[in-house]
Amino acid sequence: MPTDTKVNDLKINVLSEAQYEQIQSPSATELYLVPEVVDTTPTSGSTNPITSGGVYDALQNIPEQEQSDWNETDATDPAYIKNKPNLATVATSGSYNDLTNKPTLFSGNYNDLTNKPTIPTVPTHRTVNHEQITDSSFGDINLHDGFYFPNAVQDYDGNWYGAVVIGDQVWLGENLRTTHLADGTVINAGGNNTSSTIRYYYDNSSSNIPLEKRGYLYNWSSVMNGSSASDANPSGVQGVAPNGWHVPSVQEYDELFSYIGKQNRYIYSDNSSYVAKSLASTSYWSTNSSSGAVGNEQSKNNTTLFNAYPLGRYNSAFELTFTDAIFITTSAHTNGNPKGKYIKYTRSYVSQDVYGKAVGLSVRCVSDLTPLQFRDWYVKTYGTLQHKLDELPSMSGNSGKVLAVNGTETDVEWVRPVTVYSGSSEPSASLGEDGDIFILAS
């Protein structure tokens, strides 16, 4: 046993020589004042979660954990975070709009640009009910109000047709008069009424109406050329029409009448349904004394330049000549027979009826292009807006008048350059030196 010794009141534990040697001996089985080492190696089959799996939750006296909340504003709440940095709104919203000092971005609108180049304009003007309207852009207002394109399209036979813009549509200004389909297929002339063979009919008895005004009357087979009936707008049926054109549906005619009905200069007595006079030709109709009827005051007809002539129909015989203008459509009744639109000399409005497939009726066509597209195509194709202008009828001797394409005298203007014709001489080439020429409805 060790002995105790005091040195300057400091108690020192003194080992004997034998005790010291025992500590130094590597074979000693017991060390003096060395703590006991506990063996924590898990034994086989041990179920202690600490020694076998290291499970934190199995410990005793685990310190309590707090869930901190960034958005907590109550300083007494354990979840409150102290000394948080002040973050900008965008740091948490992620929104571009929360940024400060954002650059000013271009709106994408040409009019919002600065230092825009000055674009020259070509002034044009026309008269509507003798009141001059000016447009500085050569744009839609002109194209949508009776622009007439002379000799705009040629059929397989070589016939030329004028085209007229009415609303958002471009119509042939004349009835179709071809004896061939666009692919050259012959359309049979005359014969008995039939619904299975393509036919056209020509009324020789009304020879006082020139062919270029009357056109031919076509049965359903020739009009459709194998296509199914269509009430779509556009119909999508070329049928007997020239390339780039199609036969219109009822919906397309209704669009035409609806547009006309909204233009006061085209309707009678401020009634939007009274559009027939604006479509009918100024001649060849039977007379009628009813106010607003097509057959009454015929000189006031045709303000749209549509030029609807009273050719009637062929139904084993020619009928309703001089009283009715009947136009076949691609739309069909539930019984499969075609629908048609007709103008009658005693009425102010346009009517609709159903006709047999063998009946011969007049055909009008609509361009596959919009008015603006058609204008661009016309200029690109013919290199001028004066295409074959020399074939137009001569000027009359009355100042400010010109013989319109339908052969009747109508107030018009020559446009681009802005020159109103006056005098009795023929229009000279100088009219076209500074620009293009249109003939406009008054």
Image (cartoon, grey):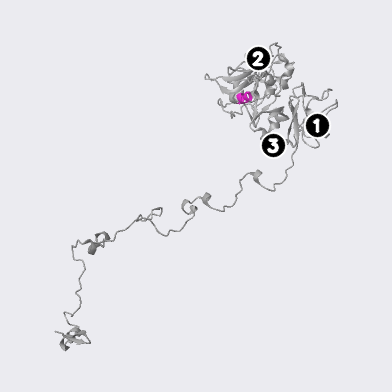
In the image, what residue occupies the spot 75% across and 34% down? 124
Q: Name the residue under label 3.
A: 376
Give the quarter of the image for residue 337: top right
Q: Is mark 1 on a helix, strand or loop?
A: loop
Q: In front here: 435 or 182? A: 435
* Residues at marks 1 and 2 touching, judged by CB atoms closer than 8 Å: no
Q: Characterize the local packing of mark 3: few (<14), some (14-19) or many (20 or more) Cα atoms within 10 angstroms.
A: some
Amino acid type at image mark 3: Asp
73 left or right of 348 in image: left
Q: Give the range drawn in magenta.
A: 252-258
Q: Distance between the residues labelled 1 and 2?
A: 38 Å
Q: What element carries label 2?
A: loop
Q: Characterize the local packing of mark 1: few (<14), some (14-19) or many (20 or more) Cα atoms within 10 angstroms.
A: few
Q: Characterize the local packing of mark 2: few (<14), some (14-19) or many (20 or more) Cα atoms within 10 angstroms.
A: many
Q: How far apart are marks 3 and 1 (CA)?
A: 23 Å
Ranked by sequence position, the earlier of labels 2 and 3 is: 2
305 left or right of 396 in image: left
Residue 419 has which mark? 1
Q: In front here: 219 or 432? A: 432
Instruction: Choose mark 2 or mark 3, whichever is in front.
Output: 2
